[in-house]
Image (cartoon, helix red, strand yellow):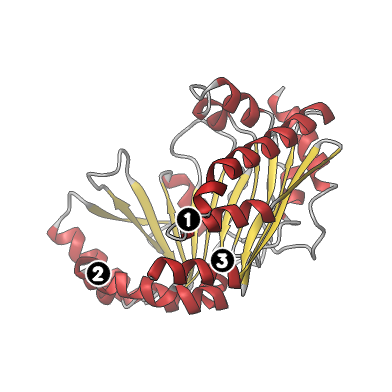
Amino acid sequence: MLLHRTLAVVSALLLFVPLNRAAELDPYLPEDTESVLNINVRQFLDSELVKKNLLELAQEALRGNDQVQDVLNDLGFDPFKDLDRIVIARPVSTEKDRGLVIVHGRFDVAKFKAKAEQVAKDESEYLKIHKVLGGKQLLYEVNHPDLDDPLFVAIVGRDTLLASPGKDYIIAALKKSGKETKPALKNKKFQALLEKVDARQSLSLAAVATPDIAKAIDKAPGDIKNTIDKIQALAGGLTISDEIKLELAATTKNTQDAKELSDSAKAGLNLVLGFTAPLAQNADSPKAELIVEIIKALRVTNKAETVFIKGRISSDLIEDALKKKDK
């Protein structure tokens, strides 16, 4: 049974994920959550590496898009100042309308409401406004040509925005607004795993194998499919400060699968290294040189049913590559 097997491998992964203080789970997490991607936007933007090398370029790119800039001005929202964290939560499901995106930051509720009312009036085919929970909350139904299905959005006070393809997810999350109750996930093993993942990282994730993943890799080449299929649970993340630090742990069904996955990962890294190393000798190939150094910095190990990938990339290495690119 998929559920029993999932719980078993998550239990194994709990033994090996680096122990940090118990993380506080996002209060709006859906009860059926079994995969979480956490993007710590504030930590990323405040990191020395990003501020020194990427922040100004990103700001200039945004200022150069007049259409997006006009919308942001109307909303009174600056993503570089007002956006803190994005959490993407999903259950083990093949249904497309499952899951919730939770955005934390600072939102001018009055301006968001005014902009929504304007769009709903002028372009009603794209946006509809519904009153929910006895008229106490507003729910925005977005119907965009690029979307196969509607997207439902709601603003919870001044610090949280919710989005989901499932209306029921938004309603359930809105009911939690203002309450001090901690989230209680149905999958207690996954909750225990999630509480060990360090949300202070720039990017962190925790997930278990899902039918969606199995379906997505079903048409992949045999070797790739067999390799990915061995992964039953995944946890870890990426931290960007004055360097880049990677810590990732993947649990398999058994120790043999862990060894084979570890060997496959090492072989893959060596293959890429063998291909890019000659290119790195060319002074005009800073990207190849950076890739080589990144691969050399990665370490793949396995213990029992778990495979670990760890690595550190120094700021000097990244900055040297960026300088060579600009020349």
Task: Identify residue for label 2.
Answer: 71
* Residue drawn at x 51%, y 45% as measured from the top left: 99
Foreground: disc 2 or disc 3: 3
The amino acid type, in three-letter code, at marker 3 is Asn
Kindly report the distance in space between the C-alpha atoms of the residues bearing marks 1 and 3.
36 Å
Residue 274 in picture, x, y percent from top left: 59, 41
Residue 8 in picture, x, y percent from top left: 80, 34
Foreground: disc 1 or disc 2: 1
Sooner in the amino-acid sequence: mark 1 or mark 3: 3
Question: Is disc 1 in contact with disc 3, using a CB cutoff of under 8 Å?
Answer: no
Q: Nearer the viewer, residue 308 or 159?
A: 308
Residue 273 in picture, x, y percent from top left: 60, 45
User: For residue 12, what is the image quadrant?
Assistant: top right
- Above or below residue 275? Residue 59 is below
* Residue drawn at x 30%, y 70% as measured from the top left: 62
Q: Is residue 123 left or right of residue 296?
A: left
Q: Does residue 186 show up?
A: no
Task: Identify residue for label 1.
Answer: 282
Q: Nearer the viewer, residue 174 or 215?
A: 215
The amino acid type, in three-letter code, at marker 2 is Val
SS of the residue under disc 1: loop
Q: Which mark is on residue 72?
A: none
Sooner in the amino-acid sequence: mark 1 or mark 2: 2
Q: Does residue 252 show up?
A: yes
Task: Identify residue for label 3.
Answer: 40
Q: Quadrant of the N terminus?
A: top right
